[in-house]
Amino acid sequence: MNRLIILFALYLLMSAAVRAETLPYNYYDTTSIPIYLSITELLTTKHPVNEGQFVDFRVVKDVKYKNKIILKSGTIVPGRVETIITSGMNGFPAEIIVDDFQIPNIDSSKLVCTYYKKGQNRCLWVYPLKWALTIIPFVGSLTNFIKGGHAKIKPSDIVTIYYYPNW
């Protein structure tokens, strides 16, 4: 019985190794190069922001790989606002998700570049307050009108995306 389990486990390992060799990317090579970006102007959910809108980021410092400069400092890199989640009732924060960075001379499939920014989460004090006020009829439901904080991406924020040159 033990031999059968060992043979079955060995078969699973061998089949997984064969499947891994047929993948289009080399996931065994984890060489990554961080690219540090900052947004050129304030992006916030307080002002109208559209999903699909392009926003400009600036490369903060030179990006090098094998002593060769891939991106110079100050290069403008556009990114797309993928999702806007507005602040919700009971203290749920707003959220901005930026993705689809288009860097010249770098294939987008070699980038891991999703950036999330959340506003202030007020749920941690709204829910205890809500439960404490439920003793008085209908007063606890007034906390439904407390909204979460707005999400802001400021020019002082550093956005880090990763380039995997060997994928």
Image: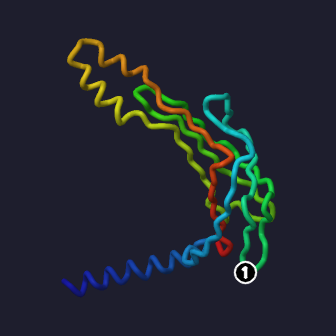
Residue 100 location in percent, x, y? 68, 51
The image shows residue 118, relative to residue 66, as above or below, that is above
> Residue at coordinates 63% horizontally, 54% vertically from top-left?
159
Quarter of image, res 91:
top left
Q: Quick one: quadrant of the C terminus?
A: bottom right
166 lies left or right of 148: right
The image shows residue 62, relative to residue 77, as above or below, that is below
25 lies left or right of 77: left
Residue found at the far bottom of this picture = 3
Quarter of image, res 15:
bottom left
User: How many residues crowd mark 1 within 10 Å: few (<14), some (14–19), many (20+)?
Assistant: few
Q: Amino acid at mark 1?
A: Lys
The image shows residue 54, relative to residue 165, as above or below, that is above
> Residue at coordinates 71% horizontally, 49% vertically from top-left?
79
Q: Quick one: quadrant of the N terminus?
A: bottom left
Residue found at the far front of this picture = 156
Residue 12 location in percent, x, y? 38, 78
The image shows residue 165, relative to residue 137, as above or below, that is below
41 lies left or right of 91: right
| In-front residue for pair 9/72 | 72
Q: Tell me how many marks there are.
A: 1
| In-front residue for pair 82/2 | 82
| In-front residue for pair 83/125 | 125
Q: Secondary structure at mark 1?
A: loop
Quarter of image, res 21:
bottom right
> Residue at coordinates 59% horizontally, 51% vertically from top-left?
115
Residue 51 location in percent, x, y? 66, 36
**What's the image's color scheme?**
rainbow
Residue matched to label 1: 66
110 lies left or right of 134: right
> Residue at coordinates 34% horizontally, 32% vertically from top-left?
125
